[in-house]
């Protein structure tokens, strides 16, 4: 058996196989022993003979990519008690140092608990990625923010409601950056969906198309209203978003939100106007947000009035800019006309 | 653990747009906008947004610049014998620019910040080369069109490597424009471009400028 392992060029995989079997035996517990699992890993399906024989099982194991080695080992483990014996243990011990480094990265993508994926490697619907898990925790943590602020405590409370240990808060930075960015991202998504729904209504003819200033006003107001439940702690969030570490992400989120609003407002500019419009709207949004932090009027009326005034200013500014441009063009044309007239009068304008 | 998460956040933030819309897989929060659900952000699902962004942005800038170059040439040589030839080439470039404007809106691509600069630089190049006479203008045309043809060919190669089926429409547009630019190049040669004094120096200088313009417009 050991000779087979050594002589095979792919022996490292076989060793992984047995190594992982060793490892996964630990958390697996008594439930793993016994008969072959019905949700078969390919190892078992393709190698019915493996149930009976050690060396064949090793050979079979080698044929699969390392990630599958875990299932292969599980199948082997489940195959028969005979294999959980010294020959395996001694062979794995002898080759213990060969690829422990190769072994680690294979474990990692499987998730924090091998038991989730042990038999279920094929069932990717049940498998939750680390990102999905983080997303769930942060979403759950949001309801504790008004009480605890944007902190690790809120995340810990959120983790508790999901039935996870409070140590899950260790997945994130202690200043709550990820929680805040997650919240901003969620708000932006909600705004996008809202704008898309409105656009659909207009396309179906069930709603009037709003004039631009009203559209911008409503969009910014809708987005800022999402902050109201968290308004007490929002200044803290703003300062965290301005940390150098977070600036790329928060800038990214801000610019795509503004781009979205303009897109649904019907902006189709392909020149420098593209930048001007977005810069103006960003300024409006940021100043209104700051005003909202200080606002203590009922229903934030002062903020909405401020917003209305700023949007009106922006519209006036753009109208004025257009007027200045056309006036300038008219003046230039007037001057050119005057020059041609003078040339004609002086007899200089001879046709070549 | 946090240290392991941070690089993941950083990596996904650097990705400007989603490369694929995985079913049910939500993104890491720090990368929020970069990896949101696709539907609101692209004209079609599943395209390689960063690559298409660059292609459309630089092509738009190129056509805009070419427009301005011909405008400059017309301003000087408009009333000369070669005026109609330049006018005809200019009209085709205007069509190209119109098409790219449409594509830019459809794919929600940001135009390059340097547009005002290309506005002036293009006009100055066109007028400057036209002041060298008809041959100078044609030499400028030859140089620029050669650069652009090569550039379009590179893009066609890139798109074909990605997925010829998915980008069929875009490929068709770029191929057609490349053929027309090639025509302009040939027209330039027909009109004695190579007889310009210091032709090779002029050509090299202009092509270097074009390469720089392409590099910058793709990124900024």
Image (cartoon, coloured by chain):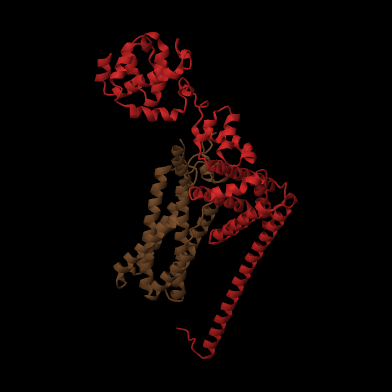
Classify residue B126 by image quadrant.
Answer: bottom left
Q: Could you say which is closer to the camera, residue A131 or residue A325?
A: A131
In this view, B18 is above or below A68:
below
Percent across and percent down for residue A174 are: 52, 40
Hue of chain B? Answer: brown
In this view, B111 is above or below B68:
above
Q: Residue at x 60, y 43 (%)?
A: A189
Please, which residue is most extreme toward the bottom here? A346
Classify residue A230 by image quadrant.
Answer: top right
**Image position of A310 (left or right of B52):** right
Which of the image's four quarters has the C terminus of chain A?
Answer: bottom left
**Image position of B183 (left or right of A207):** left
Q: Residue at x 38, y 72 (%)?
A: B129
Percent across and percent down for residue B54 are: 45, 52
Which of the image's four quarters has the N terminus of chain A?
Answer: top left
Q: Could you say which is closer to the camera, residue A60 or residue B106?
A: A60
Q: Could you say which is closer to the camera, residue A248 or residue A152?
A: A152
Percent across and percent down for residue A77 are: 40, 14
In this view, A260 is above or below A49:
below
Hue of chain A? Answer: red
Q: Could you say which is closer to the camera, residue A72 or residue A172?
A: A172
């Amino acid at each position: 058996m050991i000779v087979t392992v050594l002589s095979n060029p792919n022996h490292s995989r076989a060793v992984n196989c047995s190594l992982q079997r060793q490892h996964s035996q630990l958390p697996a517990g008594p439930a793993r022993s016994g008969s072959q699992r019905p949700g078969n890993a390919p190892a078992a399906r393709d190698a019915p003979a493996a149930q009976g024989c050690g060396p064949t099982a090793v050979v079979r194991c080698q044929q699969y990519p390392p990630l599958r080695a875990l299932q292969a080992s599980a199948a082997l483990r489940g195959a028969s008690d005979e294999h959980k014996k010294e020959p395996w243990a001694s062979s794995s011990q002898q080759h213990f140092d060969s690829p422990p480094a190769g072994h680690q990265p294979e474990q990692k993508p499987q998730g924090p608990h091998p038991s989730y994926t042990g038999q279920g490697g094929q069932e990717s619907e049940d498998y939750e990625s680390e990102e999905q898990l983080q997303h769930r925790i942060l979403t759950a943590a949001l309801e504790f923010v008004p009480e605890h602020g944007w902190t690790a405590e809120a995340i810990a409370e959120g983790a508790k409601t999901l039935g996870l240990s409070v140590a899950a808060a260790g997945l994130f930075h202690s200043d709550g950056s990820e929680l805040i960015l997650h919240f901003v991202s969620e708000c932006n998504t909600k705004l996008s969906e809202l704008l898309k729904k409105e656009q659909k209504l207009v396309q179906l003819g069930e709603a009037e198309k709003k004039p631009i200033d009203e559209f911008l006003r409503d969009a910014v107001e809708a987005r800022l209203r999402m902050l109201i439940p968290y308004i007490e702690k929002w200044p803290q969030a703003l300062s965290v978003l301005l940390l150098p570490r977070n600036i790329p992400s928060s800038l990214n989120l801000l610019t795509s939100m503004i781009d979205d609003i303009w897109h649904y407002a019907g902006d189709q500019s392909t020149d420098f106007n593209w930048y001007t419009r977005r810069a103006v709207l960003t300024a409006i949004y940021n100043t209104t947000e700051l005003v909202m932090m200080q606002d203590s009027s009922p229903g934030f009326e002062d903020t909405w009035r401020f917003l209305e005034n700023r949007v009106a200013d922006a519209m006036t500014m753009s109208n004025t800019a257009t007027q200045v441009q056309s006036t300038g063009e008219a003046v230039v044309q007037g001057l050119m006309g005057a020059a041609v007239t003078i040339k004609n009068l002086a007899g200089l304008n001879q046709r070549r | 653990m946090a240290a392991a998460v941070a690089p993941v956040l950083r990596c996904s933030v650097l990705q400007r747009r989603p490369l694929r819309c995985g079913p049910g897989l939500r993104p890491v929060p720090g990368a929020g906008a970069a990896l949101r659900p696709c539907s609101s952000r692209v004209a079609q699902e599943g395209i390689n947004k960063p690559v298409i962004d660059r292609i459309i942005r630089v092509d738009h800038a190129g056509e805009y610049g070419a427009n301005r170059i011909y405008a400059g040439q017309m301003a000087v040589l408009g009333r000369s014998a070669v005026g109609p030839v330049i006018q005809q080439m200019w009209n085709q470039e205007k069509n190209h620019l119109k098409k790219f404007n449409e594509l830019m809106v459809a794919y929600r691509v940001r135009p390059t910040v340097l547009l005002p600069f290309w506005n002036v630089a293009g006009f100055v190049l066109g007028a400057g080369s036209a002041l060298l006479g008809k041959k100078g203008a044609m030499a400028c045309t030859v140089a620029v069109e050669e650069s652009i043809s090569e550039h379009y060919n590179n893009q066609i190669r890139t798109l074909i490597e990605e997925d010829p089926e998915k980008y069929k429409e875009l490929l068709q547009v770029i191929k057609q424009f490349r053929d027309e630019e090639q025509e302009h190049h040939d027209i330039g040669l027909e009109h004695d471009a190579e007889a310009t004094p210091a032709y090779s120096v002029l050509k090299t200088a202009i092509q270097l400028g074009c390469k720089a313009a392409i590099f910058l417009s793709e990124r900024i």
